[in-house]
Image: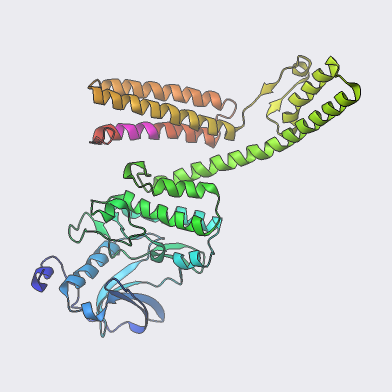
């Protein structure tokens, strides 16, 4: 492409010469790219200048790329994105993007120094996925999400996503070939296919996997990483806004299992004591009277009530050897999610088969969808009997609606049948 041809694609902002910024020092120069980063000062305040390396400053092509990054970044305003203020021509540097100065370190440095804690990693999930959700709603794909492009502030440990130099959005249809750092780039990005937000989600998952491989983390972080970085794009989390929801679900299930394990320890210990006593009694007496066995069984039944108040008894029930069981909300939550996911998956397969066999109809789907929704709501209410006001129950009800809406959307856009 000729130099004149390059300029046809861009509006180049290199006419305004600004001596307002005092350039302090260069802090970075891309080895494989075309940009350099400087720290500058104005009115006693620090700024970052992103400019072209000297060998590229005369090219309209690279000026255009810098302008593209400015136009994509300028209207972004989110606490977890580095703010872009203006684009000017700096004496001695040429065209430069003026950006927020972030006092902090890159996520790469934190990983290398093994400074990432579980709390910091959870904050990474919430804040970076929140930033992704924000710019994805504006139809912007970052295309180069990696630890070097994520900053952590020294004050507050807040995350800032930087560098939209390789990004794409609906307003631009040029320079959309392979981009990004290969280790973090999604398969479809490497193959030059049209990426969507799932490409950034893949990179997000690879970053999580890298952290979990370097620093020991609870298993639910790795499960989230695998769900985000699935090679098959259809098996990934499909929207960045769902990352936090999926993470919360994995964490709650893990914590529930941990609590159940701790609850079971006193029960198992009690059973072990009884077994030892029973074995000792049998050794001394040679046989165990029937009454001893009955008494032992009664002790075993009573043990859960000692560990946790899940079993409530009254004198009448005790006399009749009966118990009244009230399910714990977390236990109901785990069981309800299992039932919902199993039934929804079965429903999805049935509707997909109907579409494949030509038996599908919108009216039939609407009726079946309403029927399974009512049935699952009934199951959930039964599971949460006595705990109807709990957040766990409302979360399960919302999950039913979200799953059915996703199936409906799949029918409309053809993704349910792979069209």
* Residue placed most toward the observer, 70 or 176: 176
Q: Position of residue 89 (x, y in %)?
A: 24, 79
Q: Is residue 394 visible?
A: yes
Instruction: State yes or no: residue 252 in magenta.
Output: no
Which portion, as a residue range, is magenta?
A: 402-409
Q: Residue furthest right?
A: 284
* Residue placed most toward the observer, 342 or 83: 342
- The residue shown at (41%, 60%) is 80
The answer to which quarter of the image holds residue 342 is: top left
Instruction: State yes or no: residue 406 in magenta.
Output: yes
- The residue shown at (26%, 51%) is 195
Q: Position of residue 290 (x, y in %)?
A: 83, 15
Q: On the rendered structure, is 242 left or right of 292? A: left
Q: On the rendered structure, is 143 left or right of 261? A: left
The answer to which quarter of the image holds residue 176 is: bottom left
- The residue shown at (43%, 26%) is 343
Q: On the rendered structure, is 386 left or right of 275? A: left
**What predominant SS class does the magenta segment belong to?**
helix
Q: Position of residue 247 (x, y in %)?
A: 48, 46
């Amino acid at each position: 492409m000729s130099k004149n041809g390059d300029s046809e694609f861009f509006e180049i902002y290199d006419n305004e010469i600004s001596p307002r910024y005092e350039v302090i020092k260069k802090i970075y120069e891309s080895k494989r790219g075309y940009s350099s980063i400087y720290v500058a000062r104005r009115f006693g305040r620090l700024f970052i200048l992103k400019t072209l390396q000297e060998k590229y400053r005369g090219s309209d092509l690279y000026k255009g790329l810098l302008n593209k990054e400015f136009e994509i970044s300028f209207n972004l305003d989110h606490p977890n994105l580095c703010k872009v203020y203006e684009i000017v021509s700096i004496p001695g540097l040429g065209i430069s993007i003026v950006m927020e100065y972030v006092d902090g370190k890159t996520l790469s440095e934190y990983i290398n120094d093994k400074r990432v804690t579980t709390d910091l990693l959870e904050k990474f999930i919430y804040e970076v996925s929140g930033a992704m959700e924000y710019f994805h709603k504006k139809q912007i794909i970052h295309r180069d999400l990696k630890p070097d492009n994520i900053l952590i502030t020294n004050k507050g440990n807040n995350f800032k996503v930087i560098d939209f130099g390789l990004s794409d959005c609906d307003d631009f249809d040029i320079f959309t070939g392979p981009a990004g750092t290969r280790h973090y780039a999604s398969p479809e990005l490497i193959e030059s296919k049209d990426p969507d937000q799932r490409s950034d989600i893949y990179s997000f998952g690879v970053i999580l996997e890298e952290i979990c491989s370097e620093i020991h983390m609870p298993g639910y972080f790795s499960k989230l990483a695998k769900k985000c970085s699935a090679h098959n794009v259809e098996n990934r989390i499909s929207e960045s806004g769902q990352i936090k929801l999926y993470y919360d679900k994995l964490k709650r299930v893990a914590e529930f299992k941990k609590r159940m394990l701790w609850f079971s320890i006193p029960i198992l210990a009690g059973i072990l004591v009884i077994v030892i006593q029973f074995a000792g009694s049998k050794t001394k007496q040679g046989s165990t009277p029937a009454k001893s066995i009955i008494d032992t069984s009664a002790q075993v039944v009573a043990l859960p009530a000692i560990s946790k108040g899940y079993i409530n008894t009254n004198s009448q029930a005790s006399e009749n050897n009966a118990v009244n069981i009230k399910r714990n909300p977390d236990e109901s939550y785990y069981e309800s999610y299992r039932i919902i996911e199993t039934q929804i998956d079965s429903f999805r397969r049935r509707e997909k088969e109907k579409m494949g066999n030509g038996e599908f109809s919108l009216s039939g789907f609407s009726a079946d969808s309403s029927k399974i929704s009512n049935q699952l709501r009934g199951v959930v209410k039964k599971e949460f009997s006595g705990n109807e006001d709990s957040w766990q129950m409302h979360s399960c009800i919302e999950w039913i609606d979200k799953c059915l809406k996703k199936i409906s959307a799949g029918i409309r856009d053809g993704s349910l049948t792979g069209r």
